[in-house]
Image (spheres, rainbow, N blue to C red):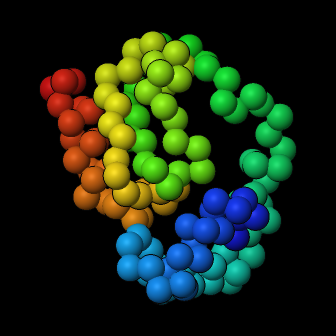
């Protein structure tokens, strides 16, 4: 699904503007093609259109939570807000690169964070 958020468009467009970091042209075209051929673009956006929740209001989630903050995310949660929203925060790390598609753009960084997050549960 192509997002109409200017920050998301900037992240997607950077590869077509000659950027070498993150997604490739083939990554973007594969993703668009998947939604186009399966006709799921509209239904994948339904969650965003129908949500009336205060998305950025702290929630007080008591389960253990780990957060990886990437600078090119649509909203990079500061650690102070994250601690309010998740009182049982077991891991927080701010990265120098990556964004909304972190698992796709920076898989190594995300895997390292996951491993470090779950290490204390062994």
Q: Which percent across, then down, holds residue 97?
A: 37, 57
Give the quadrant of the C terminus.
top left
Out of 57 and 71, give the one closest to the viewer: 71
Residue at left 43%, top 49%? 70
Q: Is residue 31 rendered to the left or right of residue 53?
A: left
Q: Is residue 10 rendered to the left or right of residue 79?
A: right
Residue at left 36%, top 40%? 94
Q: Is residue 70 visible?
A: yes
Out of 30 and 70, give the one closest to the viewer: 70
Give the quadrant of the N terminus.
bottom right
Q: Is residue 93 above or below residue 8?
A: above
Q: Number of numbered discs present?
A: 0
Q: Is residue 49 above or below residue 14?
A: above
Out of 79 and 37, give the one closest to the viewer: 79
Q: Which percent across, then down, holds residue 107?
A: 32, 60
Q: Is residue 18 rendered to the left or right of residue 1?
A: left
Residue at left 65%, top 68%? 9
Residue at left 34%, top 61%? 106
Out of 79 and 87, give the one closest to the viewer: 79
Q: Is residue 31 visible?
A: no
Q: Which percent across, then down, holds residue 58?
A: 61, 20
Q: Is residue 53 rendered to the left or right of residue 73?
A: right
- Using the rendered view, name the quadrant where residue 118 is placed: top left
Q: Which percent across, then down, holds residue 36?
A: 70, 81
């Amino acid at each position: 699904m192509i997002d109409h958020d200017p920050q998301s468009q900037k992240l997607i467009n950077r590869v077509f503007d000659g950027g070498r970091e993150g997604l490739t042209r083939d990554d973007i075209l594969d993703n668009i093609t998947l939604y186009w051929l399966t006709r799921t673009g509209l239904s994948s956006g339904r969650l965003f259109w129908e949500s009336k929740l205060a998305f950025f209001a702290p929630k007080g989630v008591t389960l253990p939570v780990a957060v990886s903050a990437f600078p090119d995310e649509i909203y990079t949660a500061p650690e102070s807000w994250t601690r309010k929203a998740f009182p049982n925060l077991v891991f927080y790390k701010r990265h120098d690169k990556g964004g909304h598609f972190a698992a796709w753009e920076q898989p190594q960084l995300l895997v390292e964070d996951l491993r470090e997050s779950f290490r204390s549960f062994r």
